Image (cartoon, grey):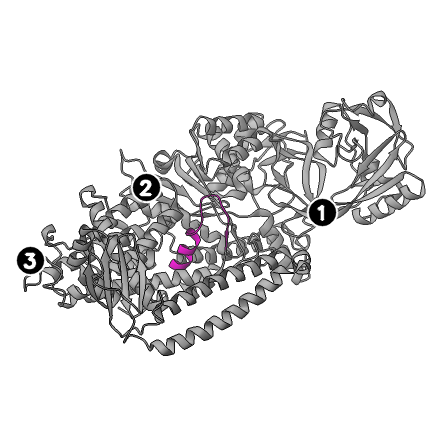
Amino acid sequence: MDKRYQPEKVEEKIYQFWEKGGYFTPKIEKGKKPFVITLPPPNVTGSLHAGHAMYVVEDIMARYQRVKGEPTLWLPGFDHAAIAVEYLVNQELKKEGKTKEEIGREEFLRRAHQFANRSRDYIRQQLKRLGFSLDWSREAYTMDEKRSLAVKTAFKKLYQKGLIYKGDYLVNWCPGCQTVISDLENIYEEEEGVLYYLSYGPITIATTRPETIFADVAVAVHPQDRRYQKLVGQKVPLPLTDRLIPVIADEAVDPKFGSGALKITPAHDQTDFEIGQRHHLPALKVVDEKGRLTNQAGSFAGLKVDEGRQKVVEALRQKGFLKKEEPLVHQVGHCERCGTTTETTISKQWFLKTKPLAQKAINAVKSGRVKIIPQHFEKNYFHWLENIHDRGISRQLWWGHRIPVWYCRDCAEIIVSRQAPRECSRCAGTNLDQDPDVLDTWFSSALWPFATLGWPHKTVDLAYYYPTSVLVTGRDIIFFWVARMIFSGLAFMGEVPFQKVFIHGLVLDAQGRKMSKSLGNGVDPIEVIESHGADSLRFMLVTGNTPGNDLRFYFERLEGARNFANKIWNASRFVIMNLKGYQPGKGPNPDHFTLADWWILSRYHTVIKEVTGNLAAYELGEAARVLYEFIWNELCDWYIELAKPRLYGNGLNVERENPTKDTTDRQTAQYVLVEVLRGTLEMFHPFMPFITEEIWQRLPHQGNTIMQAKWPVENKEWIRPLAQAQMEVIMNVVKAIRHIRSEMHIPPGKKAEAIIIALSGEVAALLGRWSFYIENLAQCQVEIFPEPAEKITQAAHAVTREAEIFIPLKGLIDLEKETVRLRKELTVLEKELAAVQDKLKKDSFLTKAPVEIIAKERTKETEFLTKLAAVKERLIILEGED
């Protein structure tokens, strides 16, 4: 084995080995319930960023279930990302000085397919480089032939049930991309604006959108607002026009906002639209698809919204309608792709009636058929579904699933079909035009759990693998995607699409921002893998985090993960290099186990119990933490060090009660090391698959791959609380002696004398029997007493719960030289402490300095006081004072 772990030599070779062996492809085992996850399909928009590496959560689950012996399918796929890909292809055309209209729909779609296919190829390689155990033989794509058929089938079924209709409704419109966008694609950002108070005769209203007054159709007040009760039912003049509009009462009005009177513009605001529906008001459109004022604005028609607002405000001011202005910070929607300020506007689109579907999705979670983890996300889920509106599903794009609707020019018949009709079903005419729009991406992705398994055909995969086991996704799309998949599964399959929903947090950049291509703050996983290895990235993403909470991406944490991988490698290398004479088929005699053997085996079986329980409860980060601490702090730092003398042959006659000159001690240590290391690697495999496979192949094992090894099973008989408690006594003593050596600057090569005063006869017997452990690990000669025979001077002192330890310093260090050094250090510390304390006494500093600066100075004061006390204590020891 190489002296250090080199992932670049290992990872590609091992992934090819897994793929060639078909280890990611499950077999259908009748009578056995499979474990199934469908990969949330990444968008084919170029590449993944480090945030997508959170797919590691799914890989951990899949690998864990495989090792448990369950038929496990993790199904990969890709999303065609309609608006995103269209935007990117348009940008490429722009560089060439062309537009999509100039090259035509057919050529544009050819280019879009090329772009998407290039992206798929690169993302597929990224997923493989991350070690994801996806069944590539079942790869799906929302735009492939099978999924296209599923989309058309779903549209037709919903249309026939009366759940899909075409009508006028409010949408998010991007004037830049010239299309409807979803709520998820409409990113709200804080902006500084102005709240304008305008006179509508006897009523003053407050608005941030004065340019839309031309589309106002009423003024609404709260029915309990006494200020305006006499005006309800009357009409008031609309500024800058010759129109009169009614005053109406509606409980949706907030009497505390602005003047408590709300101008109602149904065509450009969701609340206004709903009020307009309740009061049967017309919807007038004043902003068009290009973000310009319409003829409804009279002389202001044709102006862009921002320019129009300025000119309208000036006109209102000149004619005395503007009463006052207040600065206001408010949320303004922007297109995720192009950054253009979006418009809420009424538009003729295809819509899906969601309320009948939503209620079933609500019941599925309330009844426990779907469990959301962590549970607190259920509240948001219910709130969203209980307040859901009909959803716009059409987009003014070319890239995507074209709406399967044809219009007859001869008789105006609307034909919905999975295949292009040859003639009109009503008049037999052939003058048919297909709807030019496409379906939004969420329509196809809502079908993902069953479309990927062959629906609408009744396939073997669909019958065996549906419903899936768990859906893993980020907290940002629980409503947009998860809820839609649930009601789609119920609508088309009559069953929920998954039994559990595991919500993880988002991977943020170091500044706490969501990683995205638009911000340019994404980190390519390939770059991280090439510098640190895939296992390091995977481990970093799952540690120090709890379900549902966001994670900041720090390269410093990657360094720690890489160091841990090297720790595992070096420890394993040591074990493998010392297996000469190991007999794999021959089990040990427990009578030959030392205290250290029983301790590590007891801890190992305890860890099996904890990790298995954590994984079953989806506490992946906690499972990783338990394994990390066991490997680093117990197996590597303690047991391997204790086993070295036995493996080297100089531990005999010391550790065993009845020592012999044979190789029993060495073989026992070898057995324990192999048993514990191999089992720990098998538990750690889901988290760090490459390094664990590479090491496991070099250890004595059964089977072709660690992926098919049996998950370790806890043996309660091997859990020995007494051995753990006894070993803890010894470890505490060793730690205390090591601390003294460090604090007193005792050179590593010098062997110290340790006088240990045991606080009970039982402890004295324990320390006496296993004093070799202390002498070996703490580099000292041990003497154990029930009480000191005489006063011990010039000795460093430490206390544990079970013993007192004295280390005489004479001969170990130059007492005079160390005393002079400490006196100088004391003087420096006293000056630094005085300076900090003087600053903290000044009122000018305490009243003017920022809070964080004051806190920093208080922290310094605490640190100096702690260091000062430690230096004084060492001086007392060196100078032999009482």
N-terminal label among 2 and 1: 1
Q: Which mark is residue 613?
A: 2
- Callout 2 amino acid: Gly
Q: From this viewpoint, is residue 496 visible?
A: yes
Quadrant position of the N terminus in the picture: bottom left
Q: Is residue 266 above or below residue 727?
A: above
Most foreground residue, 72 or 760? 760
Report the mark closest to the observer, 2 or 1.
2
Crowd class of label 1 (few under 14; some 14 to 19; many from 20; radius 10 Å): some
Q: Which residue is mark 1?
A: 175
Q: Is residue 103 above or below residue 227?
A: below
Most foreground residue, 420 or 209? 209
Where is residue 621 shown, x and y percent of the image? 40, 48
Disc 2 and disc 1 in contact, CB within 8 angstroms: no
Quadrant position of the C terminus in the picture: bottom left
Most foreground residue, 606 or 242? 606
Query: Marks 2 and 1, how far apart in space?
Result: 52 Å
Residue range (magenta): 534-552
Q: Which mark is residue 658?
A: 3
Report the mark closest to the observer, 3 or 1.
3
Query: Marks 3 and 2, how far apart in space?
Result: 39 Å
Residue 265 sits inside the magenta stretch: no
- Callout 1 amino acid: Pro
N-terminal label among 3 and 1: 1
Check disc 3 and report its element: helix, strand or loop: loop
Crowd class of label 3 (few under 14; some 14 to 19; many from 20; radius 10 Å): few
